[in-house]
Amino acid sequence: MHVRDLMGEAVAGMLARPMRSALTTLGTVLGITTLVVTLGVAATAGNQIIGRFDALVATAITVEVPESEHTPLVEWDAIDRLTPLRGVESAAAVAESRDSSNLSVRSNDIVDPTRVTRQSLTVLAATTGLPEAARGRMVQGRFYDTGHIRRGDRVAVIGDQAARALGVTRLDRSPAIFIGKHAYTVIGILGDLRRERDLSTAVIVPPTAGRQFGLRDVTRVLVNTSLGAAGLIAGQAPAALSPGNGDMLQVVAPPGPTRARDQAQDDVNALFLILGLVSLVVGAVGIANVTLVTVMERVPEIGLRRALGAARRHIAAQFLLESTLIGLTGGVIGASLGVVTVVAVSAAKQWTPLLDVRLAIAAPIAGAVVGLLAGLYPALRAAGMEPVDALR
Amino acid sequence: MAEPVIELTEVCREFPARPPVRALDRVTLKVDRGDYVAVAGPSGSGKSTLLNVLGLLDRPSSGSYRLDGAETTTLRDGARTRLRGDRIGFVFQSFHLLSHRSVVENVMLAEIYRGRTGARNVPARSGTTKKGRGGRRARAMAALERVGVAHRAGFLPGLMSGGERQRAAIARALLGEPSLLLCDEPTGNLDSRNTEAVLDLFDELRGQGLTIVVITHEQEVGARAERRVRITDGVLVEEG
């Protein structure tokens, strides 16, 4: 029997009962659509999460500056050599010390036994680029500038949580806080921090003022880069910050695609994959049922074909091919619907649709395989019929 | 002398039961090329079993069956299937036309399982050539022409009369020029006018040298055959 004849007979058999074939196909259509949509939407949504995750993490560099007994490894003005580097978006030098991490800070000099007015807060010194480097914003007031630093003004910026703790709600009357015995004018409240969130409970003072608390030398440099520049900047920053001693600085560069992230994405995909496969199995059971019923209905036709010289394998091949074609048709329609749905969902959510081309190709093949497997038992039943019984 | 198309020798067919049912009892029958034989008998006499054995749809329990000179009882299932497809044309009482295929497509169906070499130990038919797929429709049309329903080629069987449908079924049986036309109650579903038309067609085909074996319980059909055999309780008896 010629393959084209076999194909022709299978197509004719499928089209003989178009409504039934269409309804049978529906099971695979739903299964494959679910599979493509779940995997496609999972990949697309995952890509959005990863994109945001990466934007925050993949562009953040921290340069740790070890203590030096003699001259500081990084001068306060070294930051001016770093910011011109192509790819650096913001940077700030910070000085912290163990001694300054738990200083007594209060909002006025009056002792009020009914209220807690004294707080233990971290005091640190930083350069003017800190709000941007910490990816925060000034909730009220402003950050100090180079003028404040140069003049040695006793001004401070406090984190938003520190402000709440100290009862500082307004800045229009230039409130003061006392760090130890030294009064400082609060000129700004820093909040909405997406990096260095500890700063929300800190008091930030200019480097010139920080010396009073032992904050002489830069201990850390926070750098934000443009996307993709982190690796380059991580290599260049030590030399820019400390020419000649760059190798003594420790650069904490953003991690690559983390295992944890991949694991999370894999878990999500596995869940969706199981859902899609369950749908597909339901479709397969539908095909198997209908094909079996069809075989039973077509017993006289099987007898006729055997009488005309069809071997058992011809009968089996025809029914297998019919169920495979039903599965393939379902797969093609399902894959198309799935891709359209993924694109539609992405358009509605303003996401970039992300669909593996292999999935779009594999989905119809999966449909065909489902049809093939589902048709196996009915086809064997058909092939096993004796022509005498089938013609009776 | 030409070899007989059918040569049954002491053929028995038993079905397992308590006691076993012997549907064919030492049947011996020789049908020469061009013979027109009617097998008559009451219901349950073994007519259908004989047709099944002759059509290679069933195996005898014992005895010998030579078709076109080839012993068939020793052939494996695949070889019997090939031999059946190549050498035997079937005409059934209920036509067995596929309702969703046109008449010409139904006739063409007879050829799709052919075109292979004959079974081992089976002599090739003289004058046969391996035929390609290309001329299949033309050959089907010629077969329909031969039985007088070429004008219905594009029709679905459901839109035709019983007589026309049986003629289409005969055209299908004739495609590929079989050695033997096996007919099982071919006029059982036809009215008298269509019965007459089909019997006329058999006369015509017999005149063209085709070997025909008709299983029937209708006396009118048996009367038209040149040879009549009667089967009763599995025993075959030649009638005058």
Image (tube, coloured by chain):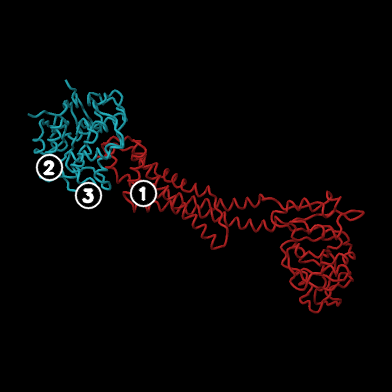
Chain colours: A red, B cyan
N-terminal label among 3 and 2: 3
Q: Is disc 3 in contact with disc 2, using a CB cutoff of under 8 Å? A: no
What is the quadrant of the N terminus of chain A in the image?
top left
Q: Position of residue B184 (x, y in %)?
A: 18, 37
- A73 to B136, vertically: above or below: below
Q: Which quadrant holds residue A388? A: top left
Label 3: few (<14), some (14–19) or many (≥20) C-alpha neighbours in 10 Å: some
Q: Which residue is mark 2?
A: B195
Q: Which residue is mark 3?
A: B158
Q: Is disc 3 in contact with disc 1, using a CB cutoff of under 8 Å? A: no
- A185 to A213, vertically: above or below: below
Mark toward the viewer: 1 or 2: 2
Mark toward the viewer: 3 or 1: 3
Mark 3 chain = B
- B16 to A376, vertically: above or below: above
What amino acid is found at the position of numbered circle 1 in the picture?
A: Val
- A182 to B155, vertically: above or below: below
Q: Which residue is mark 1?
A: A290
| Mark 3 and mark 2: Cα distance apart in space | 19 Å
Residue sitting at the far left? B240
Residue A385 at least partly seen:
yes
Q: Is residue A266 left or right of residue B201?
A: right
What amino acid is found at the position of numbered circle 2 in the picture?
A: Thr
What is the quadrant of the C terminus of chain A in the image?
top left
Q: Secondary structure at mark 1?
A: helix
Mark 2 chain = B
Mark 1 chain = A
